[in-house]
Amino acid sequence: MKSLLLRLTLFLCAGLAATTAADSELVVAFLPKSKGNAYFISCKAGADKAAKELGVELLFDGPTDSNAAKQNEIVENWITLGVDVIAVAAENKEGISTALRKAQKAGIKVVTYDADSMPDARSFFVNQATPQGIGYGLMDEAARLLNSEGEFAIITASLTAANQREWQKHIEARLAEKYPKMKLVAVRPCDDLKDKAQSEATALMSANPNLKLILAICSPGVPGAAEAVKQAGKTGKVKVIGLGLPNENKRYVHEGVTDSVILWNTGDLGYLTIYAGVALAKGELKPDAKTFKAGKLGSFEIIGDNIMLGKPFIFNKGNIDQFDF
Amino acid sequence: MKKYFRELSVVAALGAVLLGLAMFAPAFFQPQPLLSLVTREAPTLVVACGMALVIIARQIDISVGSQFSVCSVCAGLLAARGWPLVLVLPASALLGASLGAINGLLVAGLRLPSIVVTLATMVTLRQGLNLFRQGEFVNMPDKFQWLGLSQSGGQWTLVGAAFALLIVLGLAMRHVAAGRFVYAVGTDAEAARLAGIRPGRVTFLVFIFIGALTGLAAIMNIVQSPQVQPLSGAGLELKVIAAVVVGGVAISGGRGNLWGAFAGLLLLACVSPALTHLHIEAYWEKAIQGAIILLAVVADGVRSRKESRG
């Protein structure tokens, strides 16, 4: 019964797509890890904008939870439907790749964004951030706030997690290279727990009276550190920045406890992904390209088969309310 | 004196750590940050009290971390809907008690081993919560923080409440019949049954009790900041089991007390801030905590061998 209903829906969709195909040449299908997730909804906002500018039809569907099997099912449906481009944020790198290869065989152009599949299952990956970009971005922002002078501490998720170590390595490299008057006094793990980050930040402040800034490189660490600074009555005296999500930090950014939250611009990520997918389908984007121009956002670097979104985006008091994820 | 040797040795270790800090890092004792750190441990103490009871009854509950997360998120959502604290608090305790009752029914009713039952409920609750929230924070109304009091007022209230609970429970375990029943069941369930105690019922109630305490602790935690992280209880089970074991409660049941668990909790909790104050790398944190647990277990092992040789 369920599958009958599904087929019927698909048939209707196909009919719709066929009628719209008359005035918009291409159909682009955009698959998030989870469609209710605010992060992907904000990616979709950029994707919608790009689709409108390019005059293509955008299909948006995804699992209601982060479900790898459901992603495969949706891709299979899109293959049956005969879309022109599929853009995927892969929940499971290996898992999705079989379905994507099948799509490529059917002549559909495939790009990935946010989380990559196996390289042979897609043409390009739209890479939202490199570890170096993030590490340098965080360190430069810390230096800007402290006028390149003073003590700071890092709160990390765990001392052993690969991505955290990678970011920390680039932060330290940038520190050594550019900011001799700044000093990293401690690195404390918070186990990805906001509450532990709060305790760690409290102890960091009392143990280091000259501490000027706390830099959290895991998302729960940013609001955790901010709450500790606020409770210690050190708002403004000890600044807080970090890698995090706007919604978790809005309150502290508006209170002036947290100065900046760093991530990538999710809207731009969606926008660039659609532009890349459409260019690929039109044959304008070749496998050996070195740069790619995406509408109003201008030119992006391509390294290998990764289209680089570029510098991380800084959320602060002025712009954070425009983002809802 | 000799009877409490095990607990006193933990207190002595704690005293030595604090003395060392007083000598090398007196900034540790600044009142305001110290109060904040102690307040952060108040909810943990409440769960540790429940865990002590469970382990004394010769059971274990590793689902408390997940229960804590579920209660925190549900309480946060109720608060966000405008429920006042006087309703959210009992609702959370009741939810915790119900989750505990599931464990209790499976362990006492079906006689399944508690480590397997609570492992299953731990995973189920945690994954259910992940599915439901996908890690998204719950924002609560401002008036909720610090129970509507000032920051220091709220902190003292939370610390005072946890401490009062510890004293009442600690005394009850020794002087009230129900408390003695827990020891009796943990020492020898069959003997307890012959003495007219119903071990199944005691076990069932102990699981409900730790659930209710976990629900209460969840509230004591979420009032300390304006937003709830759905992951908030992750690892809590290990923290409280470690505290209880370090405090001299025998994992084989029937022995130990809440005072020891309290000292064990303080000893383990001060490792992290102590390292920060002594400017020692964080790598040592888990290693030292592990060594403390190991030492405690070895001490218990040596003691029970001596006793059995008698």
Image (cartoon, rainbow, N blue to C red):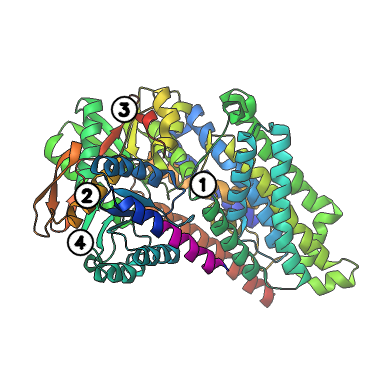
Q: Which residue is mark 3?
A: A210
Q: Are marks 4 and 2 in contact (CB under 8 Å)?
A: no
Q: Which residue is mark 1?
A: B269
From the viewer's perspective, is the residue at label 3 or at label 4 nearer? 4
Instruction: Using the image, determine if residue A289 lies above or below residue A39.
Output: below
Chain containing mark 1: B
The magenta segment is A2-13
What's the mark number on residue B299?
none
The three-letter amino acid code for the residue at tag 1 is: Ala
If you read the primary sequence from the N terminus, does the residue marked by circle 3 or circle 4 appear first?
4
Q: Label 1 vs label 2: CA separation?
A: 36 Å
Q: Same chain for the residues at labels 2 and 3, yes or no?
A: yes
Q: Which residue is mark 2?
A: A130
- Say which element carries label 2: loop
Q: Which residue is mark 4?
A: A123
Chain containing mark 3: A
If you read the primary sequence from the N terminus, does the residue marked by circle 4 or circle 2 appear first?
4
The three-letter amino acid code for the residue at tag 4 is: Ser
Viewer-nearest residue: B164 or A188:
A188
Give residue A142's position: percent from left, percent from top: 25, 32
